[in-house]
């Protein structure tokens, strides 16, 4: 290998919607060997969905004392530096990290991503499918704590190692030859800013000033009701614009569709 490679994996709080990290792990590979690792649980501002818990087994008891994403990401950025990165189905992991770096208002690591999923299709075509679990069994990789970020990062590297060996040998591989034509980066996968009318501009000021507001919010065809919210993050997803904010009545982070906000009023 002609450069170090950081191989990472993310676990999230829910299977759908805007992602929230619960675990981030990575290994740094140099000269074909794992030389260092990074791992952290992350306390999400939302509850862990039962479906996601069924996958990774990370629950509230483990996360209660974990740091926030905004605390972990600067450490991860410093640890990665300018190294290139890799993940299995890199589009998913870059999207997760893109959301979290945007929420935190932080600059992400700049390196491009290799995708072990795409490379396994090319170099391990005989596998029954190309899910990481299937490839782990097909390549007879060592078992580990399934669907945990550090174990999956190691398995992702082992899949890449096999792909590089089949491509002509691990030690002579040039990683640039295995980047996609349009390399993925975390910055390139950050969500777009919300599209908003002038009447909703107070939301931007509330986020900047870290103050609550009252939303006149319409549920379906019902009349608008007042909801006191501490706005946190504005973004666009699948052509719709949203606000993430702490509902001060429930103390839960909730997502509000901007087109349903009729007016933004100052909190009393």
Image (cartoon, rainbow, N blue to C red):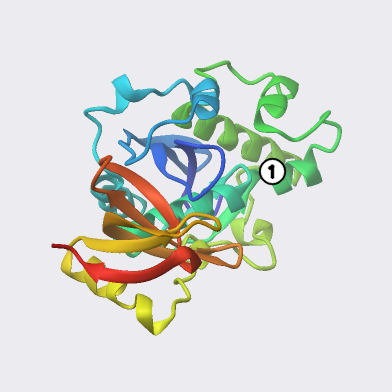
Task: From the top left corner, tell me how far across and down residue 142 is, in percent.
Answer: 58, 17
Q: Nearer the viewer, residue 69 or 179?
A: 69
Within 10 Å of disc 1 (Cα), the crowding (few <14, some 14-19, many 20+) is many
Disc 1 on helix, strand or loop? helix
- Relative to 252, say whether 190 is above or below: below
| Residue at the image position 38 percent from the left and 33 percent from the top | 47
Q: Nearer the viewer, residue 264 or 149?
A: 264
54 vs 117, left or right, is left
209 vs 82, left or right, is left
What residue sits right under mark 1 in the picture? Answer: 117
| Residue at the image position 42 percent from the left and 44 percent from the top | 20
- Residue, far bottom: 198
- Relative to 238, say whether 53 is above or below: above
Q: How many discs mark residues in the rendered view?
A: 1
Quarter of the C terminus within the rendering: bottom left
- Relative to 139, say whether 36 is above or below: below
Task: From the top left corner, tell me how far across and down residue 196 is, in percent.
Answer: 44, 77
| Residue at the image position 43 percent from the left and 81 percent from the top | 197
Q: Nearer the viewer, residue 52 or 259?
A: 259
Q: Nearer the viewer, residue 196 or 38?
A: 196
Task: From the top left corner, tell me how far across and down residue 74 is, in percent.
Answer: 26, 53
Is residue 117 shown to the viewer in this render?
yes
| Residue at the image position 42 percent from the left and 52 percent from the top | 255
């Amino acid at each position: 290998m002609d450069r170090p490679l950081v191989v990472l994996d993310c676990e999230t709080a829910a299977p759908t919607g805007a992602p929230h990290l619960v675990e981030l792990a990575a290994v740094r590979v140099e000269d074909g060997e794992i030389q260092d690792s990074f791992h952290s649980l992350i306390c999400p501002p939302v509850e862990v969905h039962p479906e996601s818990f069924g996958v990774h087994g990370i629950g509230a008891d483990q996360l209660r004392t974990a740091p926030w994403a905004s605390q972990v990401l600067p450490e991860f950025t410093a640890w990665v530096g300018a190294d290139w990165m890799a993940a299995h189905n890199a589009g998913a992991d870059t999207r997760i990290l893109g959301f979290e770096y945007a929420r935190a208002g932080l600059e992400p690591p700049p390196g491009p991503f290799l995708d072990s999923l795409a490379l396994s299709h090319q170099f391990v075509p005989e596998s029954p499918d190309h899910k990481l679990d299937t490839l782990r069994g097909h390549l007879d990789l060592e078992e580990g704590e399934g669907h945990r970020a550090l174990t999956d990062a190691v398995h992702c590297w082992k899949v890449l190692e096999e792909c590089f060996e089949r491509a002509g040998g691990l030690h002579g591989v040039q990683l640039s030859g295995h980047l996609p034509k349009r390399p993925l980066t975390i910055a390139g996968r950050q969500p777009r800013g919300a599209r908003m009318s002038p009447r909703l501009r107070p939301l931007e000021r509330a986020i900047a000033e870290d103050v609550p507001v009252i939303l006149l919010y319409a549920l379906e065809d019902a009349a608008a009701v007042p909801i006191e919210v501490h706005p946190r993050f504005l973004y666009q997803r699948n052509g719709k614009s949203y606000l993430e904010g702490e509902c001060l009545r429930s103390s839960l982070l909730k997502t509000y569709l901007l087109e349903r906000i009729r007016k933004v009023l100052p909190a009393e």
